[in-house]
Image (cartoon, rainbow, N blue to C red):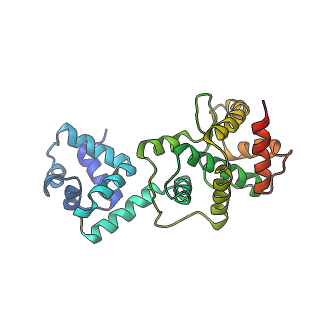
Amino acid sequence: MESTKERLLSLMEQYEIGKKPLSRLLGWGETTVMRYLDGVEPNKEFALRIEELSKDPWQYAELLERQGNVLTDTAYRKTKRAVCRRIFCDKSTEAMQYVIGLAEGDISPYRVIAVLYYAQVYSLVCRGLPIFEEEVSAGERQKTPYPKLYERLLKYGIRLRQPEEPALSIEEKGFLENIYQLLNGYSPNAIRAVWNKEKRQLKRRALHSGTGHLAAEELCSYYETVLQKTGKQSIEDLKRYFALRLKEK
């Protein structure tokens, strides 16, 4: 189990922030962090706060948004770059934020995840490559294909964030944009209806895998089959697919 001193050192290294700036950011006295590093034990509330921030870059980013004005411009820019690198450590996060940007922040968490999912499907069947590495969860109780991303959106809300070093290609952004426009024509209930029909079939594949998750190859295999009736090479094919799914009993 990590000590408070170890967590503080980890936090400072991850977010590239010094002792005094971190104390100011946390609203503590300027020497507070220094005393904890010298071995003074913090009270339970302070220790829990340090632990949360060291484990969760989203919480640190929230703190930086609220309290960043207490830092110098140089310290603020440096630690903001560091936390952005931590937040955008995978492409699923960048794709999620790109969809939020398309909607200018006016979008529900469920619709964000639906856009990510069908853009991933579209990319797999059209070019044989995923946009991001997150595996689909097709368990009976899962309300969305990507429950971890969905829970993050519910916890922190819809926030517009930009990566310091974008990783999405122009083609991948195009998939996200096309699916965003496509799903704008459907209500949340209609999107859920299509996903629930697919989930019943995907669940069997997930159970067969023994993990409850579907890798990109398995997802591609399923949609290669189900899209045979409507085609799989354009966004118009996907529109026809949605229309047929919604007519099914």
Asked whether, in this view, residue 203 is left or right of residue 224, the answer is: left
Above or below — where is 163 with respect to 203? below
Considering every residue shown, the one lying at the far bottom of the view is: 74
Point out residue 152 in the picture as x, y percentages from the top left corner: 46, 44
Q: Is residue 209 left or right of residue 227?
A: left
What is the total number of numbered labels drawn onto the structure image? 0
With 69 as the anchor, is 122 left or right in this view? right
65 in relation to 186, above or below: below
Identified at 13% across, 56% down, the residue is 31
Give the percent coordinates (x, y) of residue 70. Answer: 22, 62
Residue at the spot 31% in from the left edge and 38% down from the top edge: 1
Q: Give the quarter of the figure containing the C terminus.
A: top right
Q: Residue furthest right?
A: 229
Q: Residue at x 58, y 28 (%)?
A: 141
Q: Nearer the viewer, residue 114 or 78?
A: 114
Q: Position of residue 39 (x, y in %)?
A: 16, 47
Q: Is residue 92 visible?
A: yes
- On screen, residue 135 versus residue 227, left or right, reads left
Query: Residue 171 in the image: x percent, y percent?
Result: 67, 64
**Does residue 221 appear in the picture of this structure?**
no
Asked whether 20 or 189 is in front, the reply is 189
- Does 202 appear above or below 172? above
Q: Nearer the viewer, residue 97 or 22?
A: 97
Q: Which quadrant of the figure has residue 246?
A: top right
Q: Residue at x 59, y 38 (%)?
A: 144
